[in-house]
Image: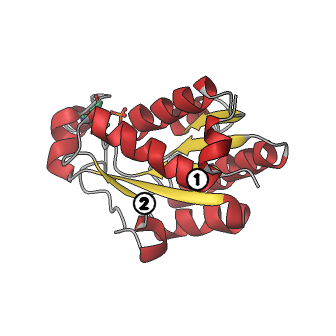
Amino acid sequence: MTKVFWFFGRCGAGKTTLAKSLYDALLGQKVPVFYLDGDEMRSGICSDLAYTPEARAENHRRTAEVAKLAAEQGLNVIVSTMAPQYGHRDIVSGVLGERLVWIFVQAPIEVCVQRDPKGLYHRAQTGHLDKLLNFPFDAPRPQESKNTIDTVAHDINGSTKLVRELAELHLGRSRFESK
Ligand SMILES: Nc1ncnc2c1ncn2[C@@H]1O[C@H](COP(=O)(O)OP(=O)(O)O)[C@@H](O)[C@H]1O
Ligand SMILES: [Mg+2]
């Protein structure tokens, strides 16, 4: 059964960086793979959605449904979204069931603010964006935190290696290495 590797965590934690590195590694091994980044979903399929609780939930439902379609057609799927609330994660796991592998990309808020890859925290601090700094991020539950990548304890190379090992574990080493 193909898998859906769903990277989640705070803005700036390193989701896109690590998701892309896994995508490149799988492609390099000729493993069929499809990548869905939350930002790309937001700018296309979900461009009609706002940031209300209902809209954020719908954003996750649509992303999960697209991932499911691709997975059912034989592709492994890599997704990255914040999935900040339990409700979002419940929607995702309800749609994807056994295929789903959560990967929690962990970094404390202070580190995320310092990295600020998209300048969003700066905009929040200067009053141009509501709710990012105080936005609640529900602490991952046991089933969501089995695969946790601490991106402070591990630099990009170390984190990339851990993610790749996780994928090998779930896809089977021989599958991962097959040409
Ligand atoms: N161990 C690490 N893993 C991933 N990214 C890291 C790590 N250490 C530092 N970074 C940096 O943190 C930033 C994370 O940005 P990004 O991947 O866009 O985050 P997200 O998609 O979670 O918002 C990048 O600038 C990346 O170079
Ligand atoms: Mg990102």
Looking at the rendering, in which quadrant would you find the N terminus?
bottom right
**CA separation in Å, label 1 and label 2:** 27 Å
Residue behind label 1 places its C-beta within 8 angstroms of ligand 2 = no
Residue at x 69% of width, y 59% of height = 99
175 sits to left or right of 157? right
Give the residue type at disc 1: Ala
Which structural element holds mark 1? helix
Q: Position of residue 155 (x, y in %)?
A: 23, 37
Q: Nearer the viewer, residue 41 or 54?
A: 41
Classed neighbour count for the residue bearing mark 1: other residues with Cα under 10 Å, few (<14), some (14–19), many (≥20): some
Dots 1 and 2: beta carbons under 8 Å?
Answer: no
- Res. 137 image quadrant: bottom left
In the picture shown, does residue 174 fall above or below 60? above
Residue 126 visible to an observer of this rendering? no
Q: Earlier in the sequence, mark 1 or mark 2?
A: 1
Disc 2 designates what residue? 147
24 sits to left or right of 141? right
Q: Position of residue 97 (x, y in %)?
A: 70, 67
Disc 1 designates what residue? 55
Classed neighbour count for the residue bearing mark 2: other residues with Cα under 10 Å, few (<14), some (14–19), many (≥20): some
Residue at x 29% of width, y 39% of height = 158
Give the residue type at disc 2: Asn
Residue at x 49% of width, y 46% of height = 81
In the picture shown, does residue 71 fall above or below 90? above
Q: Nearer the viewer, residue 18 or 67?
A: 18
Which residue is situated farthest in the right direction here?
73
